[in-house]
Image: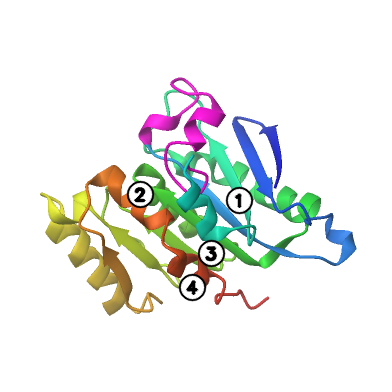
Amino acid sequence: MLSEIKQLKRLRYRVFAPAEAQAAESGTSWPVLCFLHGHGEHSGLLTIDQAMARHGPLKDDDATRQAFADRFIVVFSQLPAPGGNVWLKYAAEVEELIKSVWHDYGGDPKRTYLTGFSYGGNGVFSLVAVQPGLWAALWPVDPTLNPIPKPPQPIWLCLGDYSRGDEASLQRRGFQELKKAGANTDGVYVDYGKDHSGTATSAYRDRRIYDWLLTKQLKK
């Protein structure tokens, strides 16, 4: 895979692309998966390489990497210190970097997906609220807040420690409220029976979800 570290205003990000990925002018297009990290991976604590190796699709783990196996361009963006539950503040920069990936690597605007773990899971719902036409499907992994507002995109929600602890009723009720409100959830959610970080490991190893993402496409 091709790998580059880039800087866009306040966000540093890294792009992993299949070796065959080329500029958009070539006519080749690739699905794009954008990952939003959680609280402990901001630039004041970890380098970008250390951060992306902890959780998510770029975790330093063969089983995780094999789950998506050169089928996606994967983007990891890193919040500046002090991080926090603040992805909404960086929505414009995330959108700008995704559009640059479309151009530079032949990313497919119709097949661009948003995922995130913990605070990044919250960020999935925050960003789609202001970018409803950018993402073809959503994959929040153990978010720490009630999953609102109602997005139009298909959702696969992975639950774990928060879903079984004090937040259990909040998470499950929130998901059911999404369905009642008419959100396009496909009725898909899974609780792996793991703690918070264990849920991330299980989710990003789950090939079913990558396969599911690839069935979703924006109508533009």
Give the Cα distance between marks 1 and 2: 16 Å
Report which residue position mark 2 lands on: 200
Q: Are marks 3 and 1 in contact (CB under 8 Å)?
A: no
Quarter of the picture containing the C terminus is bottom right
Amino acid identity at mark 4: Trp
Report which residue position mark 3 lands on: 132
- Toward the top, the furthest residue is 44
> Mark 1 or 4 closer to N-term?
1
Report which residue position mark 4 lands on: 212
For residue 73, side relative to residue 106 (left or right): left
Q: Are marks 4 and 3 in contact (CB under 8 Å)?
A: no
The x, y position of residue 102, in whole percent, is 74, 56
Identify the secondary structure beneath mark 1: strand
Give the Cα distance between marks 1 and 4: 16 Å
> Mark 1 or 2 closer to N-term?
1
Q: Is residue 16 magenta?
A: no
Amino acid identity at mark 2: Ala
> Which mark is drawn over residue 74?
1
